[in-house]
Amino acid sequence: MTVAGAAFCACQSDPDADNAAKWTADQRATIESVKPVEGSDGHLFEMDYTADYKLPEMMEKGCTSLPEALLLLYKTLLPDSRVLLQNASTQGVGCSTFSSASSDGGYVLGRNYDYPVKGCYYMVVRTSPKNGYKSIGMADVSALLADPDPKNPFSTVRNQEITLFAPFSVLDGINEKGLMCSFMQLEFESTMQDRGKTKMLSNWILRVILDRCQTVSEAVEMMDRFDICSIFQNEDMDLHYILADANGDRAIVEYVDNQMNVLRTPELIGEDAPYIMATNFYLTPGRRVDRETGLWEKKELGYWRFDQLCQDLKSNPSPSKAEAMDYMKNVRIMYNDQDEIEALKRLDRDPEKFESWSWMSLWSSVYNSKDLSMDVCIREDYDRKFSFRIE
């Protein structure tokens, strides 16, 4: 395998070389498909996931926490391998999103993934499950890599092996039916539903939606089949979701007091409009509150980004894909952005914990339901766009 210019062998000096001998032929082919995207300066990679990632088994077993999820991945996908990934951590993410009609035809979904600048490695993940829909999406694999070589982050067996978990690390995506989805961070308590249904980690539900659903209505119904458990359950944070389909239906889904709420545009901005948007505060009526004042004010984390998206969409509610990327550029979190710093300070966040506030928009993605495409700009370089498509 050639990844970032170095041949796969893990060589005999790799202490985990014995694990590679236990991969199936399809898993090896999947790992060998990983390659750097030309022009991305070693940050963006792509893979064709042709192995079976056994979603039905994952859906049946379920999981309630990140450690449990990692163990389930090993037991299900790599049952004969020695566990190499001992732990993983989560950290809150920013993120902005919207969906609207597009002047290019179909509908678009735009999303910024905001995270500390130390996140350096991102994966375009293509999947073609036998009993599901094809999809393409973006995954952040930075947090799972161990001491990656900047010139070749997948040079070791350990770092090659974690790419087999990539379908469950997708943060935004589109499937062959034109259904698009993503999620954003929320503050306040973590969702831990307990209705007697199978448990599902809050970020994993995106994998289920992309594989099994054609429309927003089907996605909402699918989400309700599980008891959702926040991946941030020990950090007083949660997620809410954006869903948009090829028929023009779109919604924000969030959980308040462990109850699912499905929101359309009138609930978000007080009037009907052909678009929808979200950032990092609750949109459910009655829960739009600031921790200090109890009001939905400009002090909310992500408010200025929400307001900017409103302005852009009111001026042009049917952007082209290029214009949609401009909207994402307008709401990027720039390095040491003072508005975001002040919002985080009001949430009693310690600046030292966030590497001197060194956040940025690690990627901006724009999906289109008509041509099943994904355009990506990474690390706020909007002069270079990488384009992909579901074949």
Image: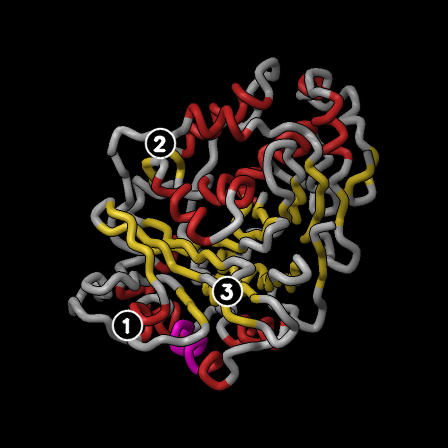
User: How would you classify the magenta stretch by its main secondary structure?
Assistant: helix
State the residue at coordinates (65%, 73%): 104
Residue named by callout 3 = 248
| Residue 199 numbered tag | 2
Q: Which mark is residue 145?
A: none
Residue situated in front as seen by the camera: 354 or 132:
132
Closer to the camera: disc 3 or disc 2? Answer: 3
* Residue visible at 70% across and 47% down in the picture: 150
Q: Amino acid at mark 3?
A: Gly
Q: Is residue 252 left or right of residue 85?
A: left
Label 1 – label 2 distance at C-alpha: 34 Å
Label 2 crowd bin: few (<14), some (14–19), many (20+), radius 10 Å: many
Residues in magenta?
305-311
Instruction: Give the side of residue 94 with respect to residue 121, left or right.
Output: left
Q: Amino acid at mark 1?
A: Lys
Rendered location of residue 330, percent (x, y): 52, 76
**To which residue does mark 1 refer?**
299
Q: Amino acid at mark 2?
A: Lys
Q: Is residue 354 left or right of residue 48?
A: left
Residue 352 shows in this picture: yes
What percent of the width, then of the height, locates residue 256? 24, 51
Find residue 292 and report its horizontal and vertical position in percent. 17, 66
Q: Are marks 1 and 2 in contact (CB under 8 Å)?
A: no
